[in-house]
Amino acid sequence: MHQNVQDLSNFYSHTKLGRSVKSILADNVFSFWPNTKGLTVAGYGFTLPVLEPIIKNSKRSLALMPEKQGVISWPLDKKNICLLCEETQWPLSTGLLDRLVILHGLETSENSRDLLLEIYRVLGPGGRALFIVPNRSGLWARRDHTPFALGRPYSLGQLERQVTDCGLLPKAHRASLFFPPSDSNFWQKFSPTWEAVGSKLSQHFAGGVLMLEVYKQIPAPVKPGLSEFVRKPLDVFEGLREPSGKPVTNPYQSK
């Protein structure tokens, strides 16, 4: 079940909690990829809160949003880079992207494996993707007033197994959002302190979200399926026994 794009936009733009989350996640994404000069950078899901720092010097940038979520125009003061797409069929050529951020995209997907295979397709050689998903053991996945409560939360092991099965190999990970999901001024005031302490104590257990950086495996892993079936066609008469005995002659056949 996808979230509504307007609800997501309102959370990150018009609530104190959302603005804190935006600042923290954007800083984390930038720390993974501080230099994207000359690269093609994209986001999938609702990535507007974290894209701005990494697209300033990029060669090309775009924000893909699933059709069931909806799309808005962004940025407001420049040429729009947002487009609507079908979840597992993106209007991008194979190998186009150098960097891809997925936020509010994987956990709400109705076809997560096909989505991961599409991510694999659009990444170029050496391309990297950064998944930001709700932490199964964190508080944020249990609070309905945040966008991280909708969809399937992940443990680090679950996320790593799922992406590896589609040819995306884990490179680095961390956790984020260590402060409670509360609009209280007290928690908002000390959220940077919580983040600093939490990042030193835990890399995947306590935080509200998990961040996993992966890269594209070349060549793609071989999976059983249609391609295997085509490579190993069955003979029409495979399994039939060889005829035995003398052949039967036609008594009406002229000699």
Image: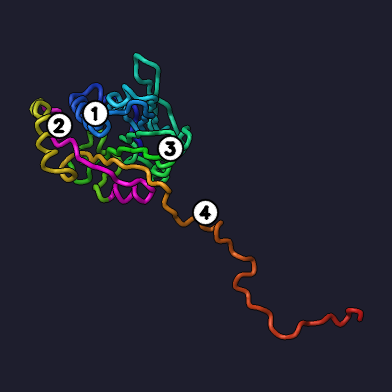
Instruction: Give me the C-alpha separation between circle 3 and circle 2.
Output: 37 Å
Secondary structure under badge 3? helix
Tell whether label 2 touches label 3 (CB within 8 Å): no
98 horizontally vs 196: left or right: right
**Label 2: how many Cα within 10 Å (few below 14, some 14–19, many 20+):** some
Residue bearing the label numbered 4? 227
Residue 2, percent across and down?
35, 36
Magenta stretch in the rendered image: 158-184
Residue bearing the label numbered 2? 182
Residue bearing the label numbered 3? 122
Q: Does residue 160 lie above or below 38 as drawn? A: below
**Label 4: how many Cα within 10 Å (few below 14, some 14–19, many 20+):** few
In front: label 1 or label 3:
3
Residue at the image point whose x is 21% and y is 40% from the top: 174
Which amino acid, by three-letter code, is at mark 3?
Val
Residue 249 makes an appearance in the image: yes
Instruction: Give me the C-alpha separation between circle 2 and circle 1.
Output: 19 Å
Tell whether label 4 touches label 3 (CB within 8 Å): no
Which amino acid, by three-letter code, is at mark 2?
Ser
Residue 34, percent across and down?
26, 29
Which amino acid, by three-letter code, is at mark 4?
Ser
In front: label 3 or label 2:
3
